[in-house]
């Protein structure tokens, strides 16, 4: 393909993209294909000769699209959103076209410097204290792993990377029972191990960590000869939106000199709205590491996760490695590859720049406030349905419910709703029971899209009860 052909097909794909988004309501939200269907439609061997782009795009429509779940569908109420606002998509097209590897300042100075400014714009938007710096990671999983590795190194006097962990004893990390599975995985990868991830029970309307139990667990570990390394708190947990009392967690952490990380991957975006900060954000400035995902609720295209650091020194001492071929001569500059696990880095900051300039914080705040209000209204509608139970009230725009019947019935209802195609939900578990999760967060969803979910749930329920 030459560059004239590239321009032609680029226009065709842009038109395809606009049409796709404008017709999403005509498509089932979740892919309706069966396992193996897409693979069976592909040739078993690679082509020997090149093919025409028109044929490739026809196969895109005929083979690929039936197997796609539409995350940008306005009636996507499953998981958490992975939004892609139009300016963010355009920014990604530019990034893909330039195709720079932005691992060092010198490999693309603009990428590094825009990233620093965008992280600070977001710091201000979330009302974090002056002095926080940060880095754009691919996902919250990577940010959390970076934090857990930093906890490990700090607890071992920064000798773990050098000497290994065989003689370091049991390093312990503490969190609540409501944390995301990425925290478990981070302890696996960091060599700490599942057995040393101490999960503390929760309490209260926000299902926050029981800090008395947290303190008791730490003291018991110290008495047993173990080495506490850090605490991971959450604001807006994936299951039901569980949120810890940040100030209370920090008080315990400081009394034991422990490194702290806050997972606010989903709910952190809502903190651009001042009215949500009192319930979910008090004490946040005391955390050593904080992660939130602009690619969830702010509209930045996946992947784009921001990790804020109160003092980057400990993470740099954990991750920085500088062979001769990566050294930058001359003036002191920031090389963000030293802040993260991967060396290679995309120009993720550009989509934040496009997004914030295109919408401004006021527009983004309005969308989040609408999502919260619509979730609360729908929750009350479902509460009024005969035999239905609200199992967890809305925490921001996430709540859960149950239909009449046992756990198997809940799963049958979820499956039937998703087979129906008009909306997409996921199951969850809470207090030992299967529940149905509902979250509002797709960037372009409307009040009508949200409120019609009651009709779908009721109609599908009538077919299976």
Image (cartoon, helix red, strand yellow):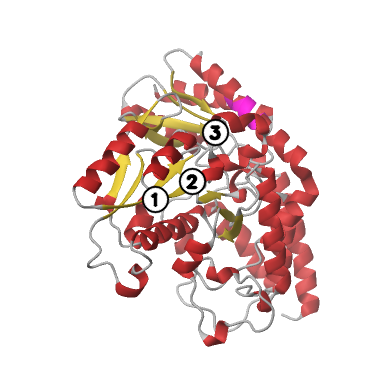
Residue 405 visible (yes or no): yes
Question: Does residue 183 lie above or below 401 as drawn?
Answer: below
Q: Main secondary structure of the magenta part?
A: helix
* Residue displayed at 45% across by 33% down: 240
Write down the residue under mark 3: 280
Numbered disc 3: secondary structure: helix
Work out which quarter of the rendered image holds the C terminus and state it. Answer: top left
Query: Crowding at label 2, few (<14), some or many (≥20) Cα neighbours within 10 Å?
Result: many
* Residue displayed at 23% across by 60% down: 169
Write down the residue under mark 1: 183
First-in-chain label (3 vs 1): 1
Q: How many marks?
A: 3
Is there a contact, CB below 8 Å, between mark 2 and mark 1?
A: yes
Residue 156 falls left or right of residue 86: left
First-in-chain label (3 vs 2): 2
Question: Does residue 257 lie above or below 375 as drawn?
Answer: below
Cα distance in 3D space between marks 3 and 1:
20 Å
Q: Position of residue 342 (x, y in %)?
A: 50, 69
Residue range corresponding to the magenta coloring: 370-375
Q: Which circle marks residue 263 in the picture? A: 2
Q: Position of residue 459 (x, y in %)?
A: 51, 23
Q: Position of residue 197 (x, y in %)?
A: 30, 49
């Amino acid at each position: 393909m030459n560059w004239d052909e590239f321009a032609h097909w680029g226009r065709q794909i842009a038109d395809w993209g606009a049409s796709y988004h404008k017709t999403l309501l005509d498509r089932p939200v979740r892919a309706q294909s069966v396992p193996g269907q897409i693979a069976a439609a592909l040739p078993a061997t690679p082509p020997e000769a090149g093919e025409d782009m028109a044929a490739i795009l026809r196969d895109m429509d005929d083979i690929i699209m039936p197997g796609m779940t539409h995350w940008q569908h306005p009636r996507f109420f499953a998981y958490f959103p992975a939004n892609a606002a139009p300016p963010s998509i355009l920014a990604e097209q530019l990034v893909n076209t330039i195709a720079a590897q932005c691992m060092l300042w010198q490999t693309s100075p603009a990428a590094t410097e825009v990233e620093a400014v965008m992280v600070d714009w977001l710091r201000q938007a979330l009302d974090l204290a002056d002095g926080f710096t940060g880095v754009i990671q691919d996902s919250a999983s990577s940010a959390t792993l970076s934090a857990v590795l930093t906890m490990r190194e700090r607890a071992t006097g920064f000798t773990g990377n050098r000497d290994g962990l065989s003689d370091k004893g049991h390093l312990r990390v503490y969190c609540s029972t409501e944390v995301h599975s990425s925290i478990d995985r981070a302890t696996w990868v960091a060599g700490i191990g599942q057995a040393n991830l101490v999960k503390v029970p929760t309490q209260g309307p926000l299902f926050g960590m029981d800090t008395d139990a947290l303190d008791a667990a730490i003291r018991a570990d110290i008495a047993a000869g173990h080495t506490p390394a850090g605490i991971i708190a959450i604001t807006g947990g994936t299951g039901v939106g569980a949120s810890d009392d940040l100030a209370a967690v920090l008080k315990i952490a400081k009394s034991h000199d422990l490194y702290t990380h806050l997972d606010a991957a989903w709910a952190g975006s809502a903190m651009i709205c001042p009215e949500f900060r009192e319930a979910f954000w008090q004490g946040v400035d005391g955390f050593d590491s904080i992660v939130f995902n602009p690619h969830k609720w702010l509209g930045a295209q996946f992947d784009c996760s921001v990790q804020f650091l109160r003092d980057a020194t400990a993470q740099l001492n954990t991750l920085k490695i500088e062979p001769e071929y990566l050294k930058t001569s001359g003036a002191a500059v920031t090389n963000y590859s030293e802040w993260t696990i991967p060396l290679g880095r995309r120009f993720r900051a550009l989509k934040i720049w496009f997004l914030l300039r295109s919408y401004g914080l006021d527009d983004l705040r309005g969308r989040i406030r609408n999502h919260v209000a619509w979730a609360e209204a729908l929750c009350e509608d479902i509460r009024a349905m005969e035999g239905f139970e609200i199992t967890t009230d809305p925490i921001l725009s996430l709540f859960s419910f149950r239909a009449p019947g046992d756990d198997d019935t809940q799963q049958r209802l979820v499956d039937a709703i998703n087979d129906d195609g008009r909306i997409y939900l996921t199951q969850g578990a809470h207090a030992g029971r299967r529940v149905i999760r509902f979250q509002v967060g797709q960037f372009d969803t409307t009040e009508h899209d949200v409120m019609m979910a009651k009709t779908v749930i009721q109609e599908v329920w009538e077919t299976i009860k």
